[in-house]
Image (spheres, rainbow, N blue to C red):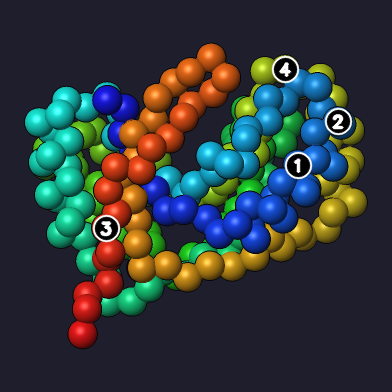
């Protein structure tokens, strides 16, 4: 099974992002837009995993803790790797420092199980679109310029989740396998 670790996003944030996407989608034919229903903040992509290894992963994720809830603010948009020749269009996320610390702890714990460490630094974002070509990119960039610095909302959470991802012709389908409360109970 194909696994990843993520945070859910609140419905009000999802709705604000969906409204932006509906405005921007007609401007850029070269972009393949994602479904907002499947949006999440990825802490760690694990990949294909056996049932036995999934049980060990569950045990390690249960040990991830933080002294406080994670706070996230969804704002601004941008491109990876750059705006001239993008592969991804994204919404940025400002977070409390403990989210990066938790992502690092997830990395360390899963690396001990043979899950490869991510080469890049943890940079949380929500993918809005992937580019199959640059057709319409100038119109998209012009529309983004007119937005200013969009704000999509905030969230506070004490939980993260282990998900299974099943690839289908219409896109990936996600199933929540486990919930992990990372703040300690008093």
Drawn side of residue 169 relative to residue 131, left or right: left
Nearer mark to the viewer, of 3 and 2: 3
The residue sitting at 31% across, 27% down in the picture is 2
Residue 21's tag is 1
The kind of secondary structure element at disc 2 is helix
Q: Secondary structure at mark 4?
A: loop
**Residue 175 x, y percent position in the rendering:** 38, 37
Q: So how many labels did they put on this image?
A: 4
Which residue shows up at 72% across the image and 46% down it?
A: 18
Q: Quadrant of residue 118?
A: top left
Marks 1 & 4, CB-CB < 8 Å contact? no
Left or right, 153 with reference to 175 = right
- What's the distance in space between the residues labelled 1 and 4, CA to CA? 18 Å
| 10 Å crowding of disc 2: few (<14), some (14-19), many (20+) | few
Of callouts 1 and 2, the N-terminal one: 1
Pointer 3: what residue?
180
Residue 119 position within the rendered picture, expressed as x and y whole percent measured from the top left: 34, 37
Q: Please rate how many residues cluster around mark 3, counting C-alpha atoms within 10 Å: few if below 14, some from 14 to 19, many from 20.
A: some
Distance from the alpha carbon under mark 4 to that under mark 2: 15 Å
Where residue 138 appears, as percent x and y from the top left, is 86, 31
Q: Give the mark nearer the N terminus: 3 vs 2.
A: 2
Image disc number at residue 133:
4
Residue displayed at 35% across by 56% down? 160
Disc 4 versus disc 3: distance between alpha carbons? 39 Å
Relative depth, front residue between 128 and 16: 16
Judged by depth in the image, the label closer to the viewer, 4 or 2, is: 2
């Amino acid at each position: 099974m194909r696994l990843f670790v993520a945070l859910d996003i609140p419905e009000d944030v999802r709705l604000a992002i969906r409204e932006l996407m509906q405005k921007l989608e007609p401007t850029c034919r070269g972009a393949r837009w994602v479904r907002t229903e499947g949006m999440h903040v990825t802490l760690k992509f694990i990949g294909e995993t056996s049932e036995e290894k999934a049980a060990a992963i569950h045990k390690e994720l249960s040990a991830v803790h933080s002294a406080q809830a994670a706070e996230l603010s969804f704002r601004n948009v941008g491109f990876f790797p750059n705006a001239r020749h993008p592969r991804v269009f994204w919404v940025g996320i400002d977070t409390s420092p403990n989210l990066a610390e938790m992502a690092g702890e997830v990395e360390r714990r899963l690396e001990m199980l043979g899950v490869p460490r991510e080469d890049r630094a943890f940079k949380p974002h929500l993918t809005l679109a992937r580019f199959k070509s640059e057709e319409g990119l100038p119109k998209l960039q012009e529309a983004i310029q007119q937005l200013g610095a969009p704000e999509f909302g905030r969230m506070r959470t004490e939980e993260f989740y282990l998900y299974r991802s099943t690839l289908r012709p219409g896109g990936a389908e996600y199933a929540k396998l486990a919930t992990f409360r990372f703040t300690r109970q008093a």
